[in-house]
Amino acid sequence: MEKVIFKRAALSAAVVAALVAPGMALAAQDMMSPEYGQSYETFVKDSKLTGGLFYFQRDRQRIDGDPTAAKKEGKYQSNLSHSTVQAALNFNSGYAWDTVGLDLGGFGAYDLAVTENHPVNQENEFSFAGRSWGNNAKDGSPEGGFSLSNAAMKLKFLDGGITAKGGYTQLYVPGQIGVNWSYQPGTYRGGQVEGNFGGLYLTYAIADEYKAPWYKETQVFSRAKAWMDPFADENVIDYIHGIAARYTFENGTAVTGSFGQSEGYMDSYHFKLAHKFDVMGGLSTSYQFYGSETETYTKGTSQIETYDGLAWQQALTAAWGMGPYGFRLEGLWTKAEGNEGNYLPRLTRGYANSQGANEIWWDSRSDWNANNEKALFFGVSRSLDDLVGAPGWSVGVSGAYGWDIETGQGKKAANGEDTEWAANFDVTYTVQDGKLKGTLFKLHYTDYNNDISQGGGWTDYPNIFASEHDVKFHIIMPLTFM
């Protein structure tokens, strides 16, 4: 335990030293100069105070989806039903002495309506599930309240070519470290350094705690899921970190490589090749590889193994536009042999204990990441400006299909089924002018289906849901105060 405390203290001290000491030194040198006052004023003069008001309403029906009700074989039941409001306020300072600044932010959330005493509604991801990950007793009742999302010092050097930040903040390392989102981002306790040198971008980040935006406090990292004794000594991860490099050539081709690690548990690798072709209105393409290996460890008399060898996910993506139309075509192939049976896009095992930076997201309910699964997504969007006589409207339809699903032990479902599919429909409107300019209204519907297991497949397929109908309605109103 002393070793763990020392590591966390060392991490905190390193972040504080890296951020505070240079600013103090510069201030001491500059305090007697005539330019001191003017330099300091940029801290206030370049500051921004922004925020937003947000509304989210959701009704998700799942076959046999209510864990508190009697099962009705093959019948859709309410699985998630709530309407939630959020309000956010963020302060981003300028840079005093053109070097040091401060970012502060927080938000509040409140459920206007929610199905009480329903465990799924407690973690609806837009209000608060509890104090922290692993410490939220599932009593079925979500909480309102407030949470800090950002409290970090920031630095810049070489005319902004190198930047750094540390404290309670958001970290992003391509392919490795990201944050969960509601309308607000998750928060790490850690720091990050970034640098741009011509076409070369470099970054390194490290953290020892995290909170998703539906928790109020940060929590340590764990090898286990939230209900599997996550804070036992053998499960606690002292830190996660990641490093990445991206080079962008003059023709627009970009090559990204990164490495991430959770102490004593997982090593992760990422490679991305992206290029935009000057055809079809601009054809953006990419190949992406995500891979992870985990250490086997002992818990009691059991050997805990998340992956058997290297687990990976590969993706091909293409996006292009033609007049008012936009198109997306993407494909996935996943290998995840071992106890987990699906590829985790993060450096820790439990959902919302940390978050990765996998770029593939189809808003089609499933993660399409089961062992041996191949999956395709195709979507079309259309601006309606020319049809409705007013700008800001668009619609979209999309679909996803996955096949060859296996357990982590390479077995098919007992009923022989191995596919899942979804169809989506979207309508959006963005206010173009006036006091509400920028306000977004969005309606999204998903019809998700699989025949593998109408109980959700949680025994053999830990990430396969039962069939669902999901309706989501968003209102996002950005605000700028200064």
Image: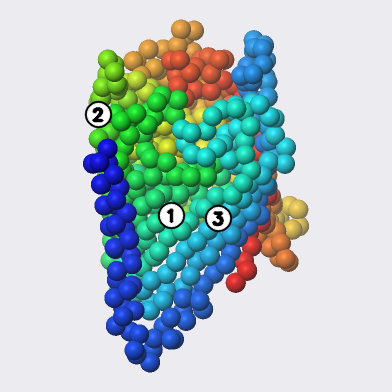
The residues tagged by marks 3 and 1 sit, at their Cα atoms, a distance apart of 11 Å
Which disc is residue 7 wearing?
Answer: none
Q: What is the crowding at mark 1: few (fewer than 14 residues within 10 Å), some, or many (at least 20)?
A: many
Q: What is the crowding at mark 2: few (fewer than 14 residues within 10 Å), some, or many (at least 20)?
A: some
Is residue 403 visible in the rendered structure shown here? no
Q: Amino acid at mark 1?
A: Thr
| Foreground pick, 61 / 100 | 100
Horizontal and vertical percent position of residue 64: 63, 16
Secondary structure of residue under mark 2 = loop
Which disc is residue 169 wearing?
Answer: 1
Image-based side of 207 in relation to 144, left or right? left
Q: Which residue is mark 3?
A: 106
The residues tagged by marks 2 and 1 sit, at their Cα atoms, a distance apart of 29 Å
Residue located at (42% from left, 69% from top): 101
Which disc is residue 295 wearing?
Answer: 2
Residue located at (47% from left, 63% from top): 103
Secondary structure of residue under mark 1 = strand
Could you tell which of marks 2 and 1 lies nearer the N-terminus?
1
Horizontal and vertical percent position of residue 28: 31, 80
Residue located at (53% from left, 23% from top): 465
The residues tagged by marks 3 and 2 sit, at their Cα atoms, a distance apart of 37 Å
Q: Amino acid at mark 3?
A: Gly
Horizontal and vertical percent position of residue 173: 35, 50
Q: How many marks?
A: 3
Image-based side of 352 in relation to 15, left or right? right
**Viewer-side label of 3, 2:** 3
Q: Amino acid at mark 2?
A: Glu
Above/below status of 371 relative to 242: above
Image-based side of 457 in relation to 269, left or right? right
Horizontal and vertical percent position of residue 477: 66, 56
